[in-house]
């Protein structure tokens, strides 16, 4: 057939349901991400702490073993809100490192190489694009945060019995809610910064900077002005305050729980505004 | 030959100046560097105005310093007013109706012209006393040392060097302009030296000027006599030491991140590794402590920073106390490490191949 006869015509194949179209981006991105051996190794390393916690829970209920080790069952630290709060802090930090590795490469290359118009010229909205990219992080971070957390809760529930489970049902809710908040905030920050700087190396450095330099400068504000306002830019402290409240463990944070929620809300709104401003099918080049 | 190399290095520095100082991509480095200056200035202005305000309030509501010592928790509001008189400021915070009993939370503020006291009353009883004493120079020096060592050295200079030095080679890859340098009759080592000195010049200028301005802004709140006495004593030595530590930090971290930009396609992973290693320094055993840059930089600081008071006791126990390195050892180690990294980087630069992949 002559080339000139290959004219444009409608796509006649089956189309993905509009509600699930955003998953197409995630599917292709996972295929690319899991080619990295480092990422796979890092994900495996992230499972060490939950595994250690699971062993600890099992041991603390294994009376014969404790007797053999000459330990009383009461000598082991209790599996309570504080235990899961520490779990959140450890896995939350690893989730942050994982975001620094994965997040910058999600949006920046598309914007830098002018690929946005190619996505958005298809029956695919900006919201679907952001949802698709965000889904990549949400699923990866879930794998190392709340999913193992719930597994730990279930192991403890299985070992401690129905009374413990009924009395501590709120813990399951706190694990899911606390870690979902964190992974949503991390994902939004990663996507917004990746879209803003358009260079994945700079975006990675910026994500690190927002958390580390934010915490450092927050401490300087506290130190110099002798006020608690520095805590507002320390996102780690903000989320630790929320976790301490959710897990009903004492917090020595400088800001109240309401202030922490407001800071997180403002951060998310700012990230969404940045994304709405950057993710467009056109770009004005000056 | 040396003359030619020198000329080439100067040319590279001249070409790089605009990219390092005025690049849009590097504007955040200025924010990192000069944010503490703004903070110190705002604080100094606030403290000066507050001091004047307290003096004025003390003349309107005179209370002698000794009377404040007799105020203890448990006293009633009337007893406090009887001893101190009417406060210069008062506020009823809120009424908690949760337990069906109306509870009042009242705040009273008093001053003797220098110190500021806030008394918290709950249901008419004094429950908490907050005392804000005036900022003294030794206290401000300690605050400066803490923020310099925990924020400026560890984070601002660190990330500033990441931004500037990684960009020297990686940025050229991104802009697809590195081949212009490669096509010139210039040795790769000379190119690397030129780029390193350009980055060094930028970071040293930005961060030492920030240190100097922070120092000036910190001193600004004090009276002229206090500043003159301080500068006549240890002041200038401390100032010089802070500037030198800043410059040495740029020298050391700069070399590391220049090498990182050359060796790794994604410099974030090594950056995170270096950041974690430097952050973990207080908890490392003495021998490992000496393998990090921050140990030598902190050894050179003139004032020892106070540890974080909010640190949990368990974590506090993990800190391993190690004596500081001597000035000569610290400077030698930083310079030697820099030379070693630069030599390794220049060997890598000889094998450098351009790959304009999507960064």
Image: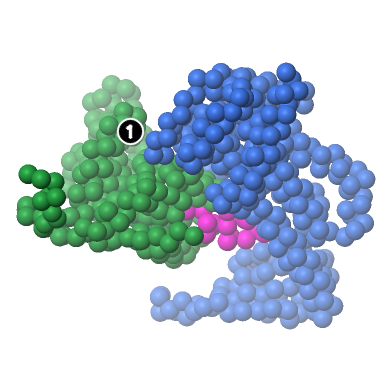
Chain colours: A green, B blue
Work out whether B348 lies above or below B354. Answer: above
Quarter location, residue B317: top right
Residue B230 in view of the camera? yes
Which residue is found at the position 14% from the left and 50% from the top?
Answer: A4
Region of the chain picked out in magenta, as a range:
A217-237
Q: How many marks?
A: 1
Inspect this view and state whether residue B157 appears. Answer: no
Q: For the point 16% across and 60% down, which residue is it? A: A19
Quadrant of the image containing the N terminus of chain A: top left
Q: Residues within 10 Å of mark 1 (few under 14, many from 20)?
A: some
| Residue under the image location 74 percent in, 47 percent down | B209
The chain identifier of the residue carrying mark 1 reads: A
A114 lies left or right of A286: left
The x and y percentages for residue B339 are 66, 21
Residue at image coords 61%, 19%: B343
The kind of secondary structure element at disc 1 is helix
Give the percent coordinates (x, y) of residue A185.
38, 54
On screen, residue A175 versus residue B192, left or right, reads left
Work out whether residue B342 or residue A165 is closer to the camera in this orientation and state it. Answer: B342
- Please state which of residues A266 and A170 is positioned toward the viewer in this rendering: A266
Identify whether B51 is placed above or below B36: below
Magenta stretch, overall SS? helix
Which residue position is annotated with label 1? A39
Magenta stretch encompasses residue A224: yes
* Horizontal and vertical percent position of residue B10: 71, 33
């Amino acid at each position: 057939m002559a080339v000139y006869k290959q004219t444009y015509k409608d796509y006649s194949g089956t189309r993905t349901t509009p509600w699930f179209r955003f998953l197409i981006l995630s599917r292709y991105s996972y295929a690319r991400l899991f080619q990295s051996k480092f990422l796979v190794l890092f994900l495996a390393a992230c499972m060490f702490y939950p595994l250690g916690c699971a062993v600890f829970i099992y041991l603390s209920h294994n009376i014969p073993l404790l007797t053999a080790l000459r330990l009383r069952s009461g000598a082991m630290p209790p599996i309570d809100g504080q235990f899961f709060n520490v779990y959140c802090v450890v896995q939350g930090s690893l989730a942050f490192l994982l975001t620094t590795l994965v997040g910058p490469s999600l949006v920046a290359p598309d914007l830098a190489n002018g690929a946005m118009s190619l996505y958005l010229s298809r029956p695919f909205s900006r919201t679907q694009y952001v949802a698709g990219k965000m889904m990549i992080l949400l699923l990866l971070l879930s794998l190392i945060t709340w999913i193992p957390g719930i597994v730990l809760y279930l192991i403890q529930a299985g070992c401690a019995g129905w009374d413990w489970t009924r009395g501590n049902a709120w813990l399951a809710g706190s694990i899911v809610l606390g870690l979902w908040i964190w992974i949503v905030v991390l994902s939004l920050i990663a996507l917004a910064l990746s879209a803003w700087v358009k260079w994945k190396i700079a975006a990675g450095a910026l994500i690190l900077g927002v958390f580390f330099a934010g915490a450092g400068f927050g401490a300087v504000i506290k130190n110099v002005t002798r006020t608690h306002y520095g805590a507002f830019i320390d996102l780690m402290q903000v989320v630790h305050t929320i976790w301490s409240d959710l897990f009903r463990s004492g917090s020595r944070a400088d800001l109240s729980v309401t202030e922490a929620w407001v800071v997180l809300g403002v951060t998310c709104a700012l990230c969404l505004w940045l994304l709405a401003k950057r993710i467009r099918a056109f770009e004005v080049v000056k | 030959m040396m003359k030619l190399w020198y000329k080439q290095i100067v040319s590279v520095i001249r070409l790089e100046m605009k990219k390092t100082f005025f690049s849009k991509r590097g504007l955040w480095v200025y924010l990192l560097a000069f944010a503490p200056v703004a903070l110190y200035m705002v604080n100094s202005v606030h403290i000066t105005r507050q001091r004047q305000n307290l003096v004025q309030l003390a003349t309107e509501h005179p209370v002698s310093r000794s009377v404040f010592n007799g105020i203890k928790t448990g006293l009633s509001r009337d007893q406090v007013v009887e001893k101190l008189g009417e406060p210069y400021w008062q506020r009823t915070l809120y009424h908690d109706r949760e337990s069906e009993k109306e509870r009042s939370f009242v705040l009273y503020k008093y001053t003797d012209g220098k110190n500021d006291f806030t008394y918290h009353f709950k249901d008419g009883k004094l429950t908490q006393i907050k005392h804000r004493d005036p900022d003294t120079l030794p206290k401000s020096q300690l605050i400066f040392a803490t923020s310099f060592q925990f924020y400026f050295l560890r984070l601002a200079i660190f990330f500033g060097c990441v931004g500037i030095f990684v960009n020297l080679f990686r940025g050229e890859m991104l802009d697809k302009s590195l081949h212009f340098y490669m096509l010139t009759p210039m040795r790769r080592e000379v190119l690397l030296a030129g780029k390193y000195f350009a980055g060094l010049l930028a970071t040293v200028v930005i961060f030492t000027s920030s240190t100097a301005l922070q120092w000036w802004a910190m001193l600004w709140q004090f009276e002229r006599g206090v500043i003159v006495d301080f500068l006549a004593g240890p002041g200038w030595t401390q100032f010089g030491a802070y500037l030198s530590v800043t410059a040495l930090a740029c020298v050391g971290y700069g070399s590391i991140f220049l090498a990182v930009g050359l060796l790794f396609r994604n410099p974030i992973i090594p950056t995170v590794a270096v950041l974690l290693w430097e952050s973990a320094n207080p908890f490392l055993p003495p021998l490992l402590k000496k393998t990090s840059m921050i140990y030598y930089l902190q050894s050179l600081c003139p004032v020892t920073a106070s540890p974080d008071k909010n640190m949990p006791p368990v974590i506090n126990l993990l800190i391993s106390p190690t004596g500081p390195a001597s000035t000569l050892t610290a400077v030698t180690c930083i310079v030697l490490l820099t030379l070693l990294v630069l030599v390794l980087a220049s060997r890598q630069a000889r094998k450098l191949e351009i790959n304009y992949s999507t960064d």
